[in-house]
Image (spheres, rainbow, N blue to C red):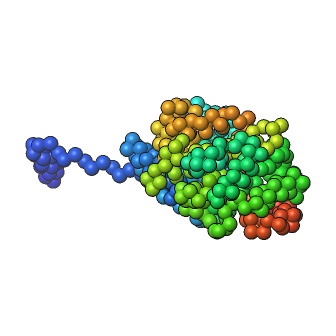
Amino acid sequence: MRHRIFRLVGFAAFLLLAGCDRGPAEPAAPAPRAAISFLHYFSDSLSGGVGEMARAFNAQNRDYELKAVSLDHEAFKTSIQDTLKTGNPPDLYSYWAGARTASIIEQLEPIDEIWARGGLDAHFSPAVIKAASEYQGRKYFVPLTQHFIGFFYNKRLFEVHGLQPPKTWDEFLAVCAALKAAGVTPIALGASDKWPAQFWFDYLLLRTAPFEFRERLLSGQARFDDPRVTAVFARWKQLIDKGYFNSQPHPNNLAWDLGANEMLFRGEAAMTLMGTWNIGYFTNDAHRWEAGRDFDFFPFPVIDPALPVVAMGPIDGLVMPRRAANHVGAGEAMIHLAGVDAQVALARGSGALAPNRQVPLSAYSDIQRRVREEVERSPIFTFALDLAVPPAVAELGLNAIADFLAFPGTYPQILGQLADDAESRFSAARRPN
C-alpha cells in the first residue's frame, strides 16, 4: 500500500512536470474587480464630466470598479431616503453640503481616517472644510464641485440694444425697462422644479438685509413675516408687475433648462438667474455657444452698498452610508475623486469651480476664472435656502415661493402662513429623537 501511494505521488509529479514541458502556460485571467456603487444626481443637463471622472478612476485602479448610476434631482431626493431606510444603500452618494448632509448624518460613516490617509487637508481650504465637510466635529463629506449663482445673459442681445451688465439695482431696472420696451422678455425664470426661484428670494434678502439676520431667519430665530422679508417680496412683486419675467409659459410651468435657458438661446429672453452649471449647458454639443461671445455672466447687482457682497451657491460632494457594503473601495474612490485630475474633469464638463485648491487657474476657461475671482472677492460664501435649512423647512419655503409666483398679491398672507409653519418645523427639528 505504501509503495502504491509513492507511485501515485510520483505519477502526479510526472504529469505536473510534463505539463511544464508543453511551453508557457496561458496567463491567468485577472481577478474580477470589486464594484463600488455610486448613486448621484449629475444627470441630463448636469451630467458634464461625471463619465470622464469615473472612467479615469477605473483605468487607474486594479482592485475596484466605480459603477455610477444617475437620477434626476427630484427623483434622487426621494431615492436617497428610500435606500437609506431599506438598509441596502449604495457605497457612495453624491449630496449637497450643508443642511441636507446634516439631516442624514446619523446614517453616514465618518471618514476621518480616509481624510487623513488621503491628505485631504492639503486639498481644501479651511473655509470649505468648515462649510461642507465637518459635522459634529468629524469629517463626512468630500467636496467635488463648487458652483456660483449669478445672472447668465445673451450677450448678443445686450450688444444689439446697447446694454452693459448692471452693477447696481438702478442699473438693473434700467436694463429691464430697455429690454421690455424693445419687445424682449428681460428675465427668464423656469421654476417648475421650485428650487430655481429661491435664488431670487435669497439674493434680494442678502442685498437688502444684514447677513446675520438671514442666519437667524434660516435657523428659526426670526420669522418669515419679519418686515425685512416682506420687503423682499414687495420688491420682487414690482418686477413681476412690470412684466419683466416671462408670463407665457408661467415660471411655475417652465423648466430651468429646456425652458428658461432655451428662451435665452433663442433670443426670446435676455437674462436668467442660475448656477454656473449653465456654462456646461450652453457650451455643450447641442448649443455650442462660446462664453464671452454668445453669453456671459454678472453677479447679482448691489442694492444697499453698505452691505457686504455675499456670494452664493451649492457645494456638491460625496458621502458614505454607514451600511454601505464596500467601505474600503468607497474610501479609495473618495481619495481619487478629491484629486486634481478628477476635479478638473468635473469642472471642465460642468462649468463648476473645483473645491480642490491645488487646481491651477490654467485648468479653467476664461469665464470660470472670472467666476472664481468673483467668489474670492466676496467676504462670505453661503448656501441657498433649501441647503441652509432642514429639508422639512426647505419644502415649506419652496412651496411658499411657488405660491407667491402664482399669486403675487397675496404675499403677506403667504409669508404669515410660512412663518407659523416654519416655526413649528424648526421646533420639531430641535426636539431630541
What residue is shown at x 55% (from left), y 48% (from top)?
Answer: 156
Q: Image quarter for residue 23?
A: top left
> With respect to residue 300, does 235 lie above or below?
below
Residue 10 image position (x, y, % from top left): 13, 46
Residue 364 image position (x, y, % from top left): 51, 37
Residue 177 seen? yes
Left or right placement of residue 425 versus residue 146 in this view: right
Residue 430 image position (x, y, % from top left): 82, 55
Q: Nearer the viewer, residue 163 or 407?
A: 163
What residue is shown at x 33% (from left), y 49% (from top)?
Answer: 31
Residue 274 seen? no
Q: Image quarter for residue 13?
A: top left
Residue 256 image position (x, y, % from top left): 60, 59
What residue is shown at x 56% (from left), y 56% (from top)?
Answer: 267
Q: Nearer the viewer, residue 282 or 94?
A: 282
Q: Image quarter for residue 411?
A: bottom right
Q: Quadrant of the C terminus?
A: bottom right
* Tally of numbered discs: 0
Left or right placement of residue 345 versus residue 217 in this view: left
> With respect to residue 384, does 372 lie above or below?
above
What residue is shown at x 19% (from left), y 47% (from top)?
Answer: 26
